[in-house]
Image (spheres, rainbow, N blue to C red):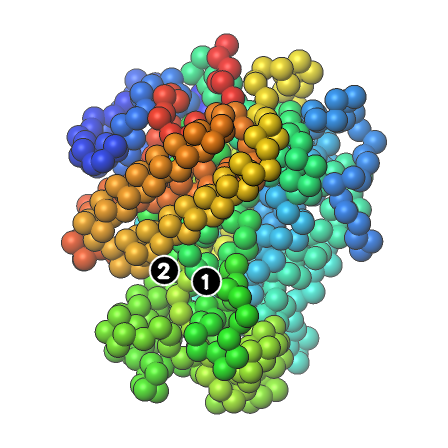
Amino acid sequence: MTTSIAGGSSNLHYRLSFRQAKGCRQASWISSLTFNGCLRNEISWSDGLSKLLQFQRYKFSRSTISKNWKPLGTRKVSVSSCLRDSTVKYFDFAVIGSGVAGLRYALEVAKYGTVAVITKAEPHESNTNYAQGGVSAVLSPSDSVESHMRDTMVAGAYLCDEETVKVVCTEGPDRIRELIAMGAMFDHGEDGNLHLAREGGHSHHRIVHAADMTGREIERALLEAVVNDPNISVFEHHFAIDLLTSQDGPDMVCHGVDTLNTETQQVVRFISKVTLLASGGAGHIYPSTTNPPVATGDGMAMAHRAQAVISNMEFVQFHPTALADEGLPIKPIKAQENAFLITEAVRGDGGILYNLDRERFMPLYDERAELAPRDVVARSIDDQLKKRCEKYVLLDISHKPREKILSHFPNIAAECLQYGLDITRQPIPVVPAAHYMCGGVRAGLQGETNVQGLYVAGEVACTGLHGANRLASNSLLEALVFARRAVQPSIDHMKSSSLDLSASNWWARPVVPSSLGSNVMDNVSRKTREVRRELQSIMWKYVGIVRSTTRLETAEGEISELEAQWEKYLFEEGWEQTMVGLEACEMRNLFCCAKLVVSSALARHESRGLHYTIDFPHVEESKRLPTVILPSLVNNNTWSSRQLHKQVIF
């Protein structure tokens, strides 16, 4: 498959009109595309960019388009990957992220070379580990690929790329069988076959699951295989700072990544022939999210700074049913870092949504009631909360047999029981929470990006599968399929590349701000935490489930002002452009992702899927095109928008 965004394969010309908006220029719909001088009239996900955003602060250049568990960070591998300098490591493949996408990919490419799996916390701390519901795949004789495709397209508000949808739905069953062969243990029915659940938006029972802890089981099986693979080294507590890139003529090339070992406070540079970004999403741009604390948009922000194409960032999925602390009999002692997810499968198994007067409300909004897609259910709950001035609604599964509830949802039952709630007898208080980014780094059918040597898989990627709204349990499926599809082109790239041992000196090194002293660092940390909470508040208030142009423009202005104030504070305290710290770098990435979401939302003048705006409340067929943020030469006026090192140009 040839994609228009493969690095170095094409140059793009655009005919644009711009809207001035507080430091951003936002493009209207694109009218023509030229690839190496040839006009393409038909625009699709895989061979054309349809809508463009360009930040004013950039100078645009067409040349840039182109079982025995031990701490793994100290595990040795018998490869020539570590030289005398312990702060520089050389590998054939660098994998950023240790969720299902990163681990599945690592296990395959390790057959051909050395692999570094770089993970921000412990390897199991990923969105995969928090995934409850399961993996969707056509495994029943009564089901069909066509039916799965149709459900995906409907949920995605017909913004999905049909070729991508077909590939994922067709290859999904084999990816499940591979997991089973690797030792993943999924639930089986009394007939001995896999027990297939049904979730909202699905027309058939096709969800493979391990009770309500599916992600945890998949992660367990994959990690066990990774630990036993001598060609894979796992580096725990290594926070990815920035990708190492160079520009060679029209081509942007990735050579690895700089990281911060958050336990030793040492900057470690990884030089690699191929890099896979599998770093997850950006749920923590919002105050309430089901994502783990590590989900701060690091991969998306790094890729954007490295000139990768970003797409569909306006489509933020709010899971309709996260556990609402306010409604629990026993309140948590302190606020949770991430909201506890009540899986879609509860509604799929017959759970009913009520307001606090015990009135069932979903049939008032959609004929599919509780089985409507997530965007519909989240907006319906949001409407109920606003109309009734309430903080949560109730999800009741207690009318089902106790044994069935406890066997299907043991994790949820145990969590709720900690707070005095018996889900077999009482309804569960729930509220929407940020859950999944449907947008991300734009990828072709093999996980390729417009940056040579850089591949993406999982939530960090935007493959075209989800369109304007992700169908339940399609995320793990997508991660598995694209991790596998990225393998062969990665191997080909690795074999055609060589490691330059002098490459480590091409870029300036980030530095740890130890010279600032503990008092200054304490002040910086405190200020950064305050700014983080303020950014999250802005995003929830103005860029939430229901939006408007005025709210979005307000968010744009307030975020810009907040970022400027934070950076001014940092630099007045003695912080320098090349300094790195976990909290500050996370904040940098959160700002970057928040701005991408706001700018993308302002550019979509319709309501489609997860993006609902009261100013354009209807779907417009002429707008059924992906939103795209193109790369540009780095000439940016904020710290969050720049790579810390100086770009290498050959």
* Disc 2 packing (10 Å; few <14; some 14–19; many ≥20): many
* Disc 1 packing (10 Å; few <14; some 14–19; many ≥20): many
Disc 1 from disc 2: Cα separation: 9 Å
Residue under the image location 32 percent in, 24 percent down = 58
Residue 59 placement: quadrant = top left
Residue under the image location 77 percent in, 47 percent down = 71
Q: Position of residue 15 (x, y in %)?
A: 21, 26
Q: Circle 2 sits in a helix, a strand or a loop, which is it?
A: helix
Figure disc tally = 2
**Image height of 115 relative to 272, above or below:** below
Q: Circle 1 sits in a helix, a strand or a loop, which is it?
A: loop
Which residue, given by chain and number where applicable, does mark 2 sit on? 155
Q: Are marks 1 and 2 in contact (CB under 8 Å)?
A: yes
Foreground of the two, 327 or 491: 327
Residue under the image location 22 percent in, 45 percent down = 553
Q: Position of residue 117 (x, y in %)?
A: 67, 39
Residue 219 placement: quadrant = bottom right
Q: Earlier in the sequence, mark 1 or mark 2?
A: 2
**Image height of 272 relative to 340, above or below:** above
Q: Position of residue 118 (x, y in %)?
A: 65, 39
Q: Given the image, on which type of amino acid does mark 2 rest? A: Ala
Q: Position of residue 320 (x, y in %)?
A: 40, 67
**Image height of 340 relative to 219, above or below:** below
Q: Given the image, on which type of amino acid does mark 1 rest? A: Ala
Residue 365 placement: quadrant = bottom left
Q: Residue 451, can we see it?
A: no
Residue under the image location 45 percent in, 44 percent down = 527
Which residue, given by chain and number where applicable, does mark 1 sit on? 472
Foreground of the two, 594 or 146: 594
Which mark identifies residue 619? none
Q: Residue 539, can we see it?
A: yes
